[in-house]
């Protein structure tokens, strides 16, 4: 892949991802008009309409497939395809919030709480947290693409995957810990695993986020940054 061709691919990847961010925002605008006409907030309103609930699950799955697909078309091997996915996901997420701010004047600030995901428990956090993660993903992709352009056969081995997934898992814990603590307090730790999806949604009807653990989030970010520095040094020094 020549440098000119790479730049063109990156430009179109960014255009696609920004458009995906606008599409995601449009869906959320419609959903909030249906379920939060007085403004979004906690506790969450339950989606009683099964068609809408199933459609939302399928839409989220379709979105992920589209991001994986554009990443695959972007790259020439696994590392560049993975990088394309990281860039697309990150830019999509960042511009999702940009367009929400433009269209709904939401979030009120970078520290406004938002729902990031619902399975297996609700992921929540201040808006700035997923944005930080998105910029970290862009950094990862940039390093991978740079190394691939300079060196032959850049790969992630089992150890690399373990370190990267372990660091990412720490961040995921920071997004789910508040909700896990809430579920433990209302149902006991021994019963959480046995909750059905309907019981989980019912339990969430009174959930209001209390505390985001910045220490755990920060540890995960440091671990992610530490890994990419380690990986860069390993490749250039081999």
Image (spheres, rainbow, N blue to C red):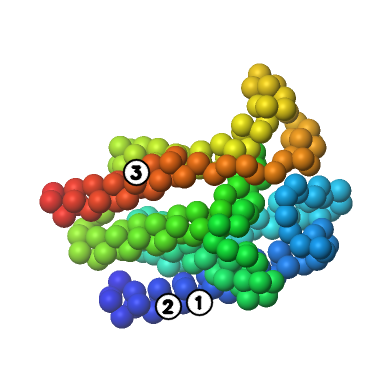
Residue corresponding to mark 3 = 223
The earlier-in-sequence mark between 3 and 2 is 2
Mark 1 nearby-residue class (10 Å; few <14, some 14–19, many ≥20): some
Q: Along the horizontal axis of the image, is 75 left or right of 184?
A: left
Residue corresponding to mark 1 = 15
Q: Secondary structure at mark 3?
A: helix
Q: Is residue 56 visible?
A: yes
Across and down, in percent, residue 65 comes to: 58, 57
Q: Residue at x 67, y 75 (%)?
A: 103
Q: Along the horizontal axis of the image, is 56 left or right of 230?
A: right
Q: Nearer the viewer, mark 3 or mark 2?
A: 3
Viewer-side residue, 165 vs 214: 214
Viewer-side residue, 47 vs 236: 47
Residue corresponding to mark 2 = 11
Q: Nearer the viewer, mark 1 or mark 3?
A: 3
Q: Secondary structure at mark 1?
A: helix
Mark 3 nearby-residue class (10 Å; few <14, some 14–19, many ≥20): some
Q: Where 179 falls versus 55 (above or below)? A: above
Q: Residue at x 54, y 44 (%)?
A: 212
Q: Along the horizontal axis of the image, is 56 left or right of 153?
A: right
Q: Are marks 3 and 2 in contact (CB under 8 Å)?
A: no
């Amino acid at each position: 892949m020549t440098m000119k061709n790479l730049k063109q691919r990156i430009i179109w990847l960014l255009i696609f991802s920004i458009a995906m961010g606008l599409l995601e925002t449009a869906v959320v605008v419609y959903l909030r008009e249906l379920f939060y006409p007085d403004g979004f907030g906690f506790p969450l309103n339950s989606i009683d309409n099964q068609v809408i609930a199933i459609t939302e699950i399928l839409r989220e799955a379709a979105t992920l497939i589209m991001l994986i697909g554009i990443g695959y078309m972007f790259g020439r091997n696994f590392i560049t395809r993975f990088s394309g996915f990281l860039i697309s996901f990150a830019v999509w997420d960042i511009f999702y919030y940009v367009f929400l701010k433009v269209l709904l004047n939401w979030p009120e600030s970078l520290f406004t709480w938002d729902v990031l995901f619902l399975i297996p428990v609700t992921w929540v956090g201040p808006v700035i947290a997923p944005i930080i993660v998105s910029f970290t993903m862009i950094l990862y992709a940039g390093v991978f693409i740079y190394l691939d352009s300079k060196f032959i056969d850049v790969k992630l081995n089992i150890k690399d995957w373990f370190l990267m997934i372990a660091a990412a898992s720490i961040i995921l814990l920071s997004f789910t810990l508040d909700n896990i603590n809430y579920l433990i307090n209302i149902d006991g730790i021994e019963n959480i695993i046995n909750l059905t999806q309907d019981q989980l949604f019912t339990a969430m009807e009174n959930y209001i986020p209390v505390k985001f653990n910045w220490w755990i989030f920060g540890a995960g970010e440091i671990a992610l940054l530490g890994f990419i520095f380690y990986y860069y040094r390993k490749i250039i020094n081999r």
